[in-house]
Image (cartoon, coloured by chain):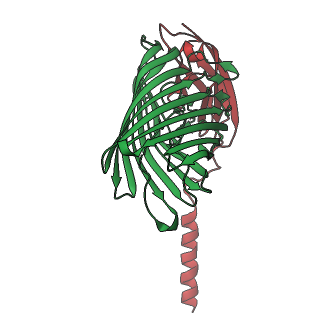
Chain colours: A red, B green
Amino acid sequence: MRIKIFFLSTLASMLFLASCKKGSSEPAQPTPFKFESLTADATEIVYSINPSTKITAVATGDGLKYYWSASAGDILGSGDRITYTANPGCCGGANTITCKVKDKYSNVDAKQVSINVRN
Amino acid sequence: MVTIGLQTYSQCCSPGNPTGGTVNQGTLEKKSWRTILFYQYGYSKGYFTGTSASGDGVLENAAFNYIGGTVAYGITHRFTAEWSGGYFINRKQLYKVIPPPDNKLSGNGISDFVVQGKYSWIKSKAKQFELTTGAGVQIPLRSKPQEKNGVILPQDVQPASNAFGFTASLFLYKGYIQKKTHLFFASQFLSAGKNDLNYKYGDAWINSFFVSYNIKYPWSIIMQVRNELRGKDHRNGQLINASGSELLYLSPQVNYNFQQQLDVSILFDWPVYKYYNGTQLGKQYNIAVIVNRVFRQKSKITNAQA
């Protein structure tokens, strides 16, 4: 009986020690969330020359996700850099492109950029 | 069985939402059912300004693959209720100004749902004549636009208009049994409101004239001439100048009847005249395969011949 108790207590101790991670420390701090900027390579599209432009979102944080929409025109690609394309027939004039960034802690921010489309 | 243009709600490249395949058909007998299932492929390429081919645009081409169906029920001898819907397998655009892999957009999903009623004011088997009018509502099954990888897709590749609307129709039929010939005229008007993208398709008015001829059972052929008039779209309350069109289609169709129970048809839509407001990607053709079956009262399973 005493041997059994000794054996079980030894086993429990070993299990306890094994569950402790070597070199464990405090949990990592989350990266502060900040949507720094939203910029377009060109804020005016001259359709006959080049009907598209790149738009880049710069943000910091953990697990970032990017959501894009446009008041008119088409958005191609995804992530932090997309291509916006339009034609004057459907989208002449100023068009607004909106980017919303969200981190894994549900922090969210949005920015807009205006692109002027002409022939 | 004759079939009006299945994809009739369209602007630009890929059409909007099919209206279903029964605008060309009259009412059913009381307590009879009709089911229609179809697959349709549409293709657009090349830009047009007015009636003329114009210079390059941003799109290489556009296409869609769609499956749809209609279920109809004869509530009375003169009144039939119909339910129509479908699913875009894909609705896609290929861009020529952007290198791969980001040079394409594609939407897919359930399209709008249409419920309508048809009433026959005149329906005479002896005289082989029918005059039927109809009205219905378009119900969006989704209110939010589709997005992929965090990007809201443009309206032209959305699987549905996402807007409520209404339809009205007129159907005329005259048969000449002795000559194995049947004449049809169908007219349909479609109007929808704006959706969550603040986009409103222009109103559409489609008129079709069909002639069908029974070659020899079980084969018949149908020739359709169809005119589609579409008004300009609106976005955020602003008129979109490069929208709206007038197209004239020739649509030959071949029909095969299986043991008086099932009709299978193949249809080709060819736009022989195209007028586009502003500069738009032009429709090249549609192809459809349609299966139609009518279940009559008292377990009599026959099928209406065109």
Q: Nearer the viewer, residue A115 or A91?
A: A91
> Residue B58 at what x, y percent from top left?
46, 18
Q: For residue B151, what is the image quadrant?
A: top right
Residue B154 in view here? no
* Outermost residue toward the left in this view: B216
Question: Residue B92 or A51: which is nearer the viewer?
Answer: B92
Q: Position of residue B67 (x, y in %)?
A: 46, 45
Q: Is residue A41 left or right of residue A97?
A: left
Pinpoint residue B18: horizontal percent, then vertical percent. 52, 38
Q: Residue at x 52, y 64 (%)?
A: B297
**Relative depth, front residue between A4 and B98:** B98
Residue B195, how many percent across, how many down? Answer: 67, 33
Q: Quadrant of residue B160?
A: top right
Seen at 53% across and 20% down, the residue is B245
Residue at 48% of width from left, 30% of height from top? B14
Q: Residue at x 48, y 23 (%)?
A: B247
Q: Nearer the viewer, residue A28 or B255?
A: B255
Q: Is residue B106 above or below residue B129?
A: above
The answer, for residue B172, to whether it is visible in the render is yes
Is residue A3 positioned above or below B148 on the image?
Answer: below
Give the quarter of the figure containing the C terminus of chain B. Answer: top left
Q: Is residue B12 left or right of residue B164?
A: left
Q: Is residue A85 above or below residue B80?
A: above
B235 to the left or right of B91: right
- Count of marks, rendered view: 0
